[in-house]
Amino acid sequence: MQMSEMKRRVKGIITDPNLSFHQRRHYLAALAEESLPYPSLTKEAEQALADGVINDLFEGPAPYRARYILPDYSLFLKNGSEHLELAAAKNLDEALNSLLIIYTQVPSITAFPVYLGDLDKILAPYVDDVSDDELYNKLKLFWIAIDRILPDGFVHTNIGPEDTRIGRTILRLERELLQVVPNISFKIDDATPDDYIKDAVETVFKSAKPHFINHPMMVENLGEDYAAVSCYNSLKIAGGSHTLVRLNLKEVVLRHKADLESFFTTTLPHYAELNAELMEARIRYLVEEAKFYENDFLAKEGLIRLERFSAMYGIYGLAEAVNLLLEKNNIEGRYGHDDYANQVSYRITRSIAKFVEQRPMPYCEGYHGRAVLHSQSGIDIDIEVSAGTRIPIGDEPDMFNHIAAVAPHHELFVAGVSDIFKVEDTAKRNPMAMVDIIRGAFRQGMRDFTFNIASNGFVRVTGYLVRKSDLEQYKTDGSRINSTVFASGSEDNSHMSQRKPKRVLTIERQPVRS
Amino acid sequence: MIAKHMQNVLGQLNDIEKFSFVDGPGNRFVIFLQGCNFNCKVCHNPYTINDCIDCAICVEPCPENALFVTANLNIELKQELCTNCDICIQVCPYDSTPLSRTVTVEEMIAQIIPVAPFISGVTVSGGEATLQADFLIALFSAIKAEPKLAHLTTFIDSNGSASLKVWERLLEFTDGTMIDLKAFDAGLHRELTEFDNELVLNSIRYLWERERLYELRLLIIPTQNDKQADLIRTARWIAKLDRDIRIKLIAYRQNGVRAEFLFDEADKAKMDWIAEIFRNEGLSRIELVY
């Protein structure tokens, strides 16, 4: 970057009336990082990166903190922290106070923590002698503090699968407060009572949260101690993901010049490896150059452990890839609607899953030395390319056929899929119908998904929430909530409002501020 | 057990819906049968009332040429050409549709099986489902006999005009019913539906006594069945039966209704007022749909 260009961009950030002080400081730091050279890549990988066939989701060229960090908050509350000069929590007040403190100290790409802990579990030791009213009042203040101190849609907590007083209170607060933060994932297994799921469904109708997680499936892949964080990335607690790089399947297909068969034998493996190369370079920089895991207090105090980390290998644009591939070969069919097109899509995801499973990745002992596959849900600069393995917005078939089309992908994506199903407004009067569908979807091997109901006050694209009213307001006034900035772009670029029930895109850093 | 000769009975189908949130408890697979014995002025899907008489009036207007006349002078549909534009339904002068077709129980079971993990049950609606009681019995008993469908409940959405003898046969395989009560007043019922309501009231009582009345539905049509005195009498009759009956008060909407029978739509204020009348008579489980 030329110095004059650097100055121009610094000035642009400093004088942007739509950015708060914290947002300006955040972008200035990103700009400073951008002045460093990228970790060394092969010419081919460099080109693919420049062309957007592979990308690092604007993590920056010199990674100095892991992208997704899931501290072991139970351990923190039990032992306290020397670095933070906090003793072990003895009661609920101390636990909540300590948590609010440590949340501000957890590194991430956005500068806000992507994980707040499975709050129903980590707070369980402190609520036995707390009355229902007290619990409600204390959690309410805590909830408001989280939203105001950590104004970022990627801040995420988990509840379930056990039915708990804390979990029930959290759902009640969600329905009452209608905050953007925190996002919530709800773990479900066969023992989770219908009535608790119904409570969660009724919360979705009001606040577009929580997201639903197939708990037994996650446990099988990641063990008991996992959580869904940020934009529905499932990772190990006390670990996380060094980085998230992603492969744009649409761009891969655009570079393929021959028949269908050779796509699987040459073009796809070629770019799949370039994405892995990018990932490896970034991991090595983070671990070996920045020495993040040697310096951060979370690691020093055992709240995160390098051996619990892996890295997320993302893909997106599957729908466009399939449709273009068929078109090139003069085959009729459309992803999500025609069986042959769906079969091609499964073949693509299975090929990539097989590649990722065979490709060793350094410092990924959290997942037997391999990256974890993720259906990446998109960011606001994605134009005419669908999130992850999703069927394009506005082109979704009816719900049954939608589930049937996408379900076979889910087992492959250990680090999360986050499909979204649009639901008719009539579901509001019959929440048990949603409970039926959730149970059915998990029985059919779905890993995680969300419903979108037309009439609640939130817009969602992929991972996080933004209030529709905030979105309107941002264009003129700026917004207090960090991620509204990102959603504003996604709404303009990919016609999010066309989705009958809505959702807003996930992005973790405003990519370009020119 | 079901008699052998009934296993091959055919149903006259209008359409199916794989996921429905409004036809009984939980998510349900809904089968809409063709043909109704009522001729309700405010019918929202009048094309389900009569069977197709193969008059061929709809063949020419079909923009996709999806309809054709067979050698036997029947109307048939080339399914792959149909775009569901519904022009055939709009031009039909006999309140029918060329899209209706006969189906076997076997075919219905095959369609339900892949959906079964996602639903609480199957509801048969219409048209008037009980006019095809033999098909219902064959279908429901087949559902109960199929291990993959054993968890499903079987429901009927009906105008309540079936005789008690028919209900007696149906109830062996039926877990619940949703019954419409168009009007409690006999004269008004006749005016709205061209049918007496004696059988309807008997059905409601009979089904309630046998604990198969899941829900009573009242469509509120402004200027037709929304007079206070009528509503109070209706509410009192229901309350005498059971104050805890689940009652759905549905606001009349113009969509789908034949042009000559359009009335004003019922608004929220009207529906709230009617709900209050019902509550004043002691009825506790009132749901409003508008």
Image (spheres, coloured by chain):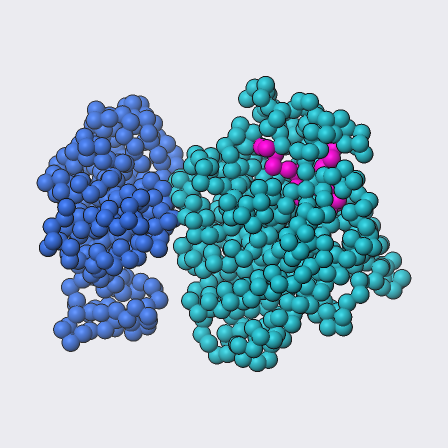
Left or right, A337 with reference to A179: left
In the rendered image, residue B176, in percent from the top left (x then y), is placed at 25, 39
Specify the segment rendered in magenta. A99-121
Q: Nearer the viewer, residue A78 or A175?
A: A78
| Residue at figure coordinates x 42%, y 37% from the top left | A194
**Image chain in blue:** B
Left or right, B140 with reference to A284: left
| Residue at figure coordinates x 46%, y 52% from the top left | A445
Q: Main secondary structure of the magenta part?
A: loop
Left or right, B19 with reference to A329: left
Q: Quadrant of the N terminus of chain A?
A: bottom right
Residue at the far bottom: name it. A258
Q: Nearer the viewer, residue B180 or B194?
A: B180
Q: Is residue A505 magenta?
A: no
| Residue at figure coordinates x 60%, y 71% from the top left | A268
> Quarter of the image holding residue A152?
top right
**Image chain in cyan:** A
| Residue at figure coordinates x 46%, y 37% from the top left | A192
In the rendered image, residue B67, in percent from the top left (x then y), is placed at 25, 71
Number of numbered discs present?
0
User: Is residue A399 shown above or below B200?
Assistant: below
Q: Quadrant of the C terminus of chain A?
A: bottom right
> Quarter of the image holding residue A378?
bottom right
Q: Nearer the viewer, residue A507 or A73?
A: A73
In the rendered image, residue B235, in percent from the top left (x then y), is placed at 25, 28
In the rendered image, residue B50, in percent from the top left (x then y), is placed at 18, 56
